[in-house]
Amino acid sequence: MVRTKEFDPDTVLGLAGQAFKRHGYHAISMEMLTEEMGIGRGSLYATFGDKRALFIAALESYAEDIVDTVIRNVEHADEPVSAIRALLQEIAEFAAKPEGQLGCLLTNTATEFGSCDPEIQAALAAGFKRIEDTYCRALTRAQRDGDLGADKKPRALARLLLSTMQGLRVIGKTNPDPRVLRDIANSAMLALE
């Protein structure tokens, strides 16, 4: 008789993403993963495949969550520039907290793997590109509505915002001083004035 899953795959995938963010891909064992996910090794393999497949699925899911956050907070906002300011301040505040000091799975993965793994590099690039595109659409709309100067370049600003967002998470790991992180966010916002 076939057993039914006694767990929600999306929930345990989120737990895997948190475990990978906390420990990194190379440092976490399968035993640690199954313990942190709350499932058995057989269930992990049957649902996600091997550690690498699980990692890529967790990375893609994490990127999707970040994109959803940016879309929810920025792209559909009545005033995108104000919404971007609020989001960067929120990221700065979070980066100063103990949980925020774990960094971002996307950034942590980029620093752990660099460019040595083409498949993971492609997953990272896709995640970062989706975030950049979301910012770009919001800034293009802000420019069309007159809230962003006609001389501004939405694509270049979107790249700056993506870099700032990821940079806040990196700096928060080593210098979680809220004043420093707020300064970074505020300085990036000057480019939108």
Image (cartoon, grey):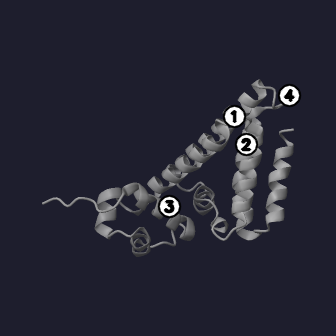
What's the residue type where badge 2 is placed?
Ala
Which residue is the site of mark 4?
151
| Local SS, label 2 | helix
Q: Residues within 10 Å of mark 3 (few under 14, many from 20)?
A: many
| Local SS, label 1 | helix
Badge 4 or badge 2: first in the primary sequence = 2
Percent position of residue 183, x then y:
85, 57
Badge 2 or badge 1: first in the primary sequence = 2
Residue at (59, 54) in percent of width and height? 115
Which residue is the site of mark 1?
138
> Distance between the Cα atoms at labels 4 and 2?
21 Å
Q: Is residue 30 left or right of residue 2?
A: right
Q: Is residue 19 left or right of residue 66?
A: left
> Distance between the Cα atoms at labels 2 and 1?
10 Å
Labelled pair 2, 1 in contact (Cβ < 8 Å):
yes
> Distance between the Cα atoms at labels 3 and 4?
40 Å
Which residue is the site of mark 2?
83
Labelled pair 2, 3 in contact (Cβ < 8 Å):
no
**Residue 134 in the image: above or below residue 13:** above
Residue that protrudes farthest toward the front in the picture: 78
Answer yes or no: is residue 63 visible. yes
What's the residue type where badge 4 is placed?
Asp
Residue at (71, 49) in percent of width and height? 87
> Distance between the Cα atoms at labels 2 and 3?
27 Å
Labelled pair 4, 2 in contact (Cβ < 8 Å):
no
Viewer-closest of 155 and 13: 13
Which residue is the site of mark 3?
17
